[in-house]
Image (cartoon, grey):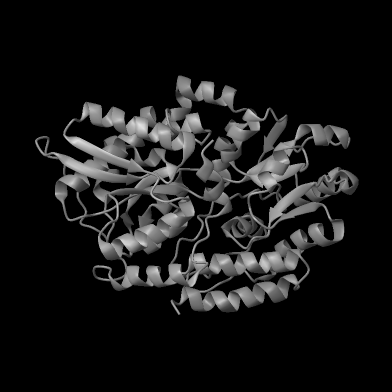
Amino acid sequence: MTLYRYSHIAGRQLGRSAAVGIVVSALFLTACGGAGVTGKDTAARLDPKANVTINWWTGQSSDAENLLEKLAKEYTAAHPNITINTSSGASTTDQLLNKLSAGFVSNTYPDISYTFGSWATQLGESGRTQDITALTKAPSFGWDQFPASARATATVHGKVIGLPAVVDNLGLIYNKKLFDQAGLSYPTPEWSWDDFRAAAKKITDSSKGIYGSAYSVSGSEDTTWHLWPMLWQRGGAVLSGDNTKPAFNSQAGVDAVTFLSDMAIKDKSVYLDQTDAKYGPLFLSGRVGMMISGPWQLYDLNKNKVDYGIQKLPGFNGDHQTISGPDLWTLFDHKDANRAAAAREFTTWLTSAATDARWSLVEGNLPLRTSETTTTQYAAFVKQFPGVDVFVANLAEAKQPRPTVPGYVEMSRYVGEAIAKAMQGAESPKQALDEAAKKSAGALAGQ
């Protein structure tokens, strides 16, 4: 299991402390030239006679870290002039932004780092990233094989700063045993949120500690990004058309949060997870009937022999939009042409269809490239992780990118806190969202 994958989704949020805010501010104060500045666009190849050492922060732990270290050793064995120093980079993936920001100040940042997609704009505006646009435009590179949401996330102000590391989306995972016990038919592609609510209410058995569903109320990005598809399905938007002001407190947003709070408060069918880390294990143990989650759960579902099913998200008026949270291998510039080229060439190899099939598919992640779905490895992958093909097909329902604008991290926290307040009855959905919008306006304006 990629331990950090729980962190990847359940804890994407940073900026929760003053220390992080100070360091991130320092990032911009030390940036080379201000907003929109990235490294020189180049596709120059590595000098084959140069001995080069690059540092790679994988953002992974346990089995995933070991697998990536093996891939790095395989690459360096075939390229003896290159040395790759591999480490997780931080004790959790969440802490990587803090480490990177501090590294920009002390000039100790890596050449390659796993980064959450929501950090892309901040990193791109640091003046420390490479611009690999020319590389991705080469016909042989196959840039269009990556999902559109991943390509958009990797592009900051028209410049590509890294390559996709993980692609995912949210779907509905359900426990077949609990559905059978409740006498319910399994979810279908046509399911509505009303169908979801009715099933959750019927599955819930307070005497046995069984809940129909679960929701994170930690205030983290896990809390927030589960709301965005419900908002989009109702015709709402996260931000204004020019991406400068909050728009989530529209009637569509209020209706979506009201739906969630009604399930939690009126139906009492939702386990409210204060930590982000409990609802997954509770689902594995048969105490939660449905969870809105992603393919990173597949490894544990199969390891624990859960009889599960997967379906795309319930919809509103036939709209089943989901959200994808692509993460990146962000490439950094140290003003050393060979070092930069080595980082590009290694990352290109890592994200090739042949290599990715030995990394993403082993870990239960979705294939990065569409070309992988025709491979024998993918056929074995689908057998090993039943239902993963639903997540692959569900990428087509990820029609809107999650914002990566400066201020998103802070806005996400305010929205997450608003959802948590509403679902726990502390404030009405409208009051909570209006309050979050007021705070977010300042964050988006850089105040």
Direction from residue 286 to residue 154 in the image, left or right: left
Q: Residue at x 38, y 41 (%)?
A: 144
Q: Position of residue 82 (x, y in %)?
A: 20, 36
How many numbered marks does the figure carry? 0
Q: Position of residue 9 (x, y in %)?
A: 56, 50
Direction from residue 373 to residue 271 in the image, left or right: right
Above or below — where is 349 with respect to 255?
above
| Quarter containing the N terminus | top right
Direction from residue 236 to residue 163 in the image, left or right: left
Q: Is residue 165 visible?
A: yes
Q: Residue at x 53, y 21 (%)?
A: 380
In this view of the protein, which residue sits in the foreground, 62 or 413?
Answer: 62
Above or below — where is 189 with respect to 102?
above
Q: Position of residue 173 (x, y in %)?
A: 69, 39
Q: Residue at x 80, y 57 (%)?
A: 263
Above or below — where is 69 with respect to 337?
above
| Quarter containing the C terminus | bottom left
Pick out the residue farthest to the front.
Answer: 91
Q: Is residue 252 visible?
A: no
Q: Residue at x 52, y 74 (%)?
A: 245
Pick out the residue farthest to the left.
Answer: 49
